[in-house]
Image (tube, helix red, strand yellow):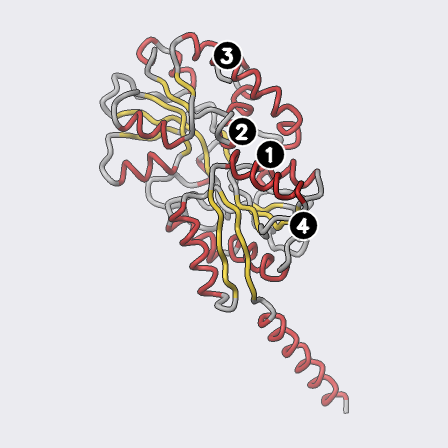
Amino acid sequence: MHIIVKAFVAGAALLGAVSGAAAVEGTLTLYTSQPNNDAQQTIDAFMAKYPDVKVTFVRDGTTKLMAKLQAELEAGSSPADLLLIADSVTMEDMAKDGKLMAYPEADVSAYDEAIQDLERMWFPTKLITTGIVYNTNAPMKPASWSDLLKEEAKGQVAMPSPLTSGAALIHTQAIVANLEQGWNYYEQLAASGAQASGGNGGVLQAVAGGEKLYGMIVDFMPIREKAKGAPVDFVFPEEGVSAISEPVAILANTKNPEAAKAFVDFLISREGQEMAVSQGYMPAHPDVAPPDGFPPLSEIKVMPFDPQKALESAEADKEKFAGIFGQD
């Protein structure tokens, strides 16, 4: 009798698991700042695993995307179920305002606590660092952030603006917090003719084209282009790099929480991390090998960063940067 009961319970549990898997269906809308090709590849891989879910995406830079999302939420609704953007500071802001759904069951046990949210409101999908790109025809091979202040780099440095790029804001905050010069580092850059505008793509174009010889940039862009033959190389400066984890989060007002959870699970799984590697990104999962051109994760020195503290000073930091570089 006990055996029959146990068999029935086991069978019911199995049926429940199958039913749960079948419940992952319907539609999802992803709001993301990923490049279009990466976003489409991510969605295609997820839908191959969950063919009963149809995913569409809306793509723009983090600043414009968040302005759109915030306006929709203030108006009462948004089609967004998931948010996949560059930085944790924006995610902290969304979580603070109650706009994200916690997912405490997500398996992030292998991930470094320094790059994740302990309240399980957002989850790391990559490790994207900001270091130095240089044109291989440049007279100096930089090894340090201080090298960008040398005479050889005068008027030859490009960087993205934190007024445009979420990664650039985090980088600015990390540099100010970790370099001895603090804001004076940026004041010296501005005095030596450094150019700050737009996003990372513009920096790559300027340095690869020889318009500028040095730049601050996210790692994967120059590493990818170097592999294609572009005259650029990337340096992880000796003082350390800033890093973003391109977090993913579920919106509190999602109409399909089970499918949204499955999307998060996919991105943080080994399979999802290996897909990130295939796209040319450093995985956030420590047991997944990085792509060609990257050093092992253990060899990259990441500057400490507190997203909650950064959120508190974000507006003041943007104003300070804008004042130094004469931006609106």
Label disc, if present, on residue 324 of the rendered structure: 3
Tags 1 and 3 touching, CB below 8 Å: no
- Residue type marked 4: Ala
Question: Quarter-wise, where is residue 156 in the image?
Answer: top left
Which residue lies at the image location 44% right of the left edge and 65% below the top edge? 48
Q: Is residue 209 above or below residue 147?
A: below
Q: Nearer the viewer, residue 111 or 155?
A: 155
Q: Which mark is residue 89?
A: 1
Mark 1, Cα crowd under 10 Å, few <14 / some 14-19 / many 20+, is many
Nearer the observer, 114 or 31: 31
Indicate which label's residue lies in the foreground, 3 or 2: 3
Q: Which mark is residue 170?
A: 2
Question: Within 10 Å of the Cα at label 2, are there few (<14), some (14-19), or many (20+) other Cα atoms?
Answer: many
Above or below, 286 relative to 2: above
Name the one closer to the observer, 71 or 313.
71
Residue type for callout 1: Val
Q: Position of residue 25 (x, y in %)?
A: 56, 67
Residue 35 rendering spot, x and y as whole percentages: 41, 43
Distance CA(mark 1)–CA(mark 3)? 22 Å
State the residue in front, 231 or 147: 231
Q: Earlier in the sequence, mark 4 or mark 3?
A: 4
Residue 252: mark: 4
Q: x, y (%) of residue 276?
A: 43, 49
For numbered disc 4, what is the local secondary structure?
Answer: loop
Whether tag 2 and tag 1 are in contact, CB under 8 A, the answer is yes
Label 3 is placed on what type of residue? Ile
